[in-house]
């Protein structure tokens, strides 16, 4: 038979086919029917062509994508997969074939195409790789390094820690695992609670994939075959949160133009040729923009060039060559995006199968929890994090100085589940050796405390934890209010109201709304402080 599509009462697609490849083709087709606009926007974003129909607001993204060589990295990763894992490469091709089959019909159903005049384009076999890279490019650490560099320049190295994200205001995803000893049925429970930005449509797609080899339900990423982050095969299930690992590096490069092109200064003191070419970005309603694309031995130059950085920073007062910033990240270095893990995850029957599959995972680096019907449990980090100097993890480092090279990969940590409970909420914990900044522990602590309130839990009990509205991060501001005195009558009423508040962010809570207004006012007041104003990028 060909692939079959059945939709339940909620419109969720349930797919069935006689083989793995035909199922992938059906998944691609149904995704194109349901998410045509999303797929095409993401394809253009991955190629750096979104400004051609979305306009100048998308130009900065397109320039970054061109300079970071995202489409070229996607192509490299697919070509490497074809050589090393032909079965998975064929499966990805089948998914792409399905997308191409369904896009025209999906576009006819989607008003955005008519409003913009965009016609759906043709997907290449590596397009899913580009979409995965595009979704996660800013998900990791290099934007934080740019921020820390601004703090270092304006306030000094000692101020960097003041802005760490291990603060009370940090939000993120939650997840927890209970072993069979802590449940009413004797079977483990895994709860996944991904906190993504509110988007329409969302980054995930509920789906059911069935063929003679497997029967899996979970959340797919539209544009990528299979089910990666949250899945259940009937006998084993898994869920993830972001590990907050640091696996992207920025190098300050010294570049110079020569008659033959551009050269970069390497750690051994030698000038070596960097690759260089130009690309043209089309912009709807405006003139096209030419982008110079340069890549050194460290990686693609994403900021600046032979003439220096955009803020006017050059090499210093001694006539040093101008500076630029190059990005180094695992897929560009290895040609591996971890897609080799996707089919083994679908075929997994036990925790050991999930564990082996995740050994091939690359990015994003995740904390994973898994459990199977035989009592197997898993709590580990999955993904590639390079071994390098501490300085690399904190801020941009000089490419021309030795000691900043990558020296292999970290072993991924594993957690202890002897007490039968594990909570993950982007906090400093299992992944601590791999990161710099993490979310504050209050969310993980709250989940752990709630799970300790009962000896045995059921799946039906889990919504009480998912829906918990207690805001532990309110404590620092409320503690500050408790110590204030000499306020005027109006301010004193606000203070007393907030100190009596139960700290629950219920939708109908006037006290919660008052807290949100006060917190917003405090943040705005702090942002207006001269010390913060000095951090503005020139």
Image (tube, rainbow, N blue to C red):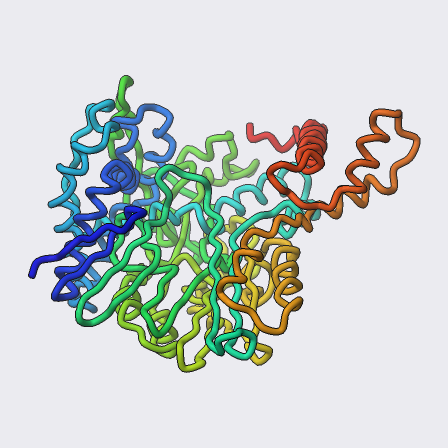
Instruction: Using the image, determine if residue 118 lies above or below residue 428.
Output: above
Quarter of the image holding residue 214? bottom left
Q: Is residue 4 visible?
A: yes
Residue sitting nearer the eye, 251 or 496:
496
Q: Is residue 261 visible?
A: no
Q: Position of residue 38 (x, y in %)?
A: 28, 39
Residue sitting nearer the eye, 167 or 21:
21
- What is the residue that sits farthest to the left in this orientation? 1
Quarter of the image holding residue 239? bottom left
For the point 40% across and 76% down, the residue is 372
Q: Position of residue 226 (x, y in %)?
A: 27, 59
Is 126 positioned to the left or the right of 132 in the image?
A: left
Q: Position of residue 130 (x, y in %)?
A: 28, 48
For the point 31% across and 59% down, the residue is 227
- What is the residue that sits farthest to the right in this orientation? 486
Q: Quadrant of the N terminus?
A: bottom left
Is 308 positioned to the left or the right of 182 in the image?
A: left
């Amino acid at each position: 038979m060909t692939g079959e599509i059945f939709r339940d009462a909620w419109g969720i697609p349930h797919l069935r086919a006689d083989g793995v490849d035909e199922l992938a083709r059906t998944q691609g087709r149904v995704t194109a029917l349901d998410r045509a606009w999303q797929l095409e926007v993401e394809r253009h974003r991955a190629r750096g062509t979104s400004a051609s129909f979305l306009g100048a607001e998308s130009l900065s993204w397109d320039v970054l994508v061109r300079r970071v060589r995202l489409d070229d990295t996607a192509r490299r990763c697919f070509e490497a997969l074809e050589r090393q894992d032909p079965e998975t490469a064929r499966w990805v091709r089948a998914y792409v074939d399905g997308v191409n089959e369904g896009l025209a019909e999906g576009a006819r159903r989607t008003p955005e195409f008519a409003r913009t005049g965009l016609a759906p384009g043709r997907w290449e076999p590596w397009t899913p790789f580009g979409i995965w890279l595009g979704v996660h490019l800013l998900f990791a650490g290099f934007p934080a390094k740019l921020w820390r560099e601004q703090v270092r320049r304006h306030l000094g190295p000692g101020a960097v820690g003041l802005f760490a994200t291990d603060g009370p205001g940090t939000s993120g995803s939650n997840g927890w695992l209970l072993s069979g000893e802590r449940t009413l049925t004797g079977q483990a429970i895994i709860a996944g609670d991904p906190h993504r930005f509110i988007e329409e449509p969302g980054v995930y797609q509920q789906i059911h994939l069935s063929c003679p080899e497997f029967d899996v339900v979970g959340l797919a990423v539209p544009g990528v075959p299979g089910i990666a982050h949250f899945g259940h095969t009937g006998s084993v299930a898994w869920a993830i949160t972001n590990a907050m690992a640091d696996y992207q590096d920025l190098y300050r490069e010294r570049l110079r133009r020569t008659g033959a092109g551009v050269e970069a200064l390497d750690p051994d003191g030698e000038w070596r040729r960097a690759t260089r070419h130009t690309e043209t970005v089309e912009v709807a309603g405006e003139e096209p923009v030419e982008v110079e694309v340069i890549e050194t031995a460290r990686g693609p130059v994403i900021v600046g060039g032979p003439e220096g950085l955009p803020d006017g920073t050059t090499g210093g007062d001694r006539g040093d060559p101008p500076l630029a910033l190059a990005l180094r990240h695992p897929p560009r270095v290895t040609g591996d995006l971890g897609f080799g893990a996707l089919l083994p995850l679908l075929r997994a029957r036990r925790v050991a199968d999930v564990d082996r599959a995740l050994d091939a995972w690359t990015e994003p680096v995740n904390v994973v929890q898994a459990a199977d019907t035989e009592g197997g449990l898993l709590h580990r980090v999955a993904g590639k994090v390079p071994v390098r100097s501490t300085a690399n993890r904190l801020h941009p480092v000089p490419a021309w100085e030795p000691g900043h090279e990558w020296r292999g990969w970290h072993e991924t940590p594993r957690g202890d589940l002897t007490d039968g409970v594990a909570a993950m909420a982007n906090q400093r914990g299992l992944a601590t050796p791999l990161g710099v900044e993490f979310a504050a522990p209050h969310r993980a602590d709250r989940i752990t405390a709630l799970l300790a309130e009962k000896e045995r839990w059921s799946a039906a009990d889990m919504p009480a934890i998912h829906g918990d509205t207690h805001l532990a991060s309110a404590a620092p501001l409320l503690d500050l209010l408790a110590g204030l005195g000499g306020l005027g009558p109006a301010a004193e009423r606000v203070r007393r109201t907030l100190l009596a508040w139960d700290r629950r962010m219920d939708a109908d809570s006037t006290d919660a709304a008052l807290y949100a207004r006060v917190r917003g006012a405090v943040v705005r007041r702090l942002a207006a402080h001269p010390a913060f104003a000095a951090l503005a990028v020139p």
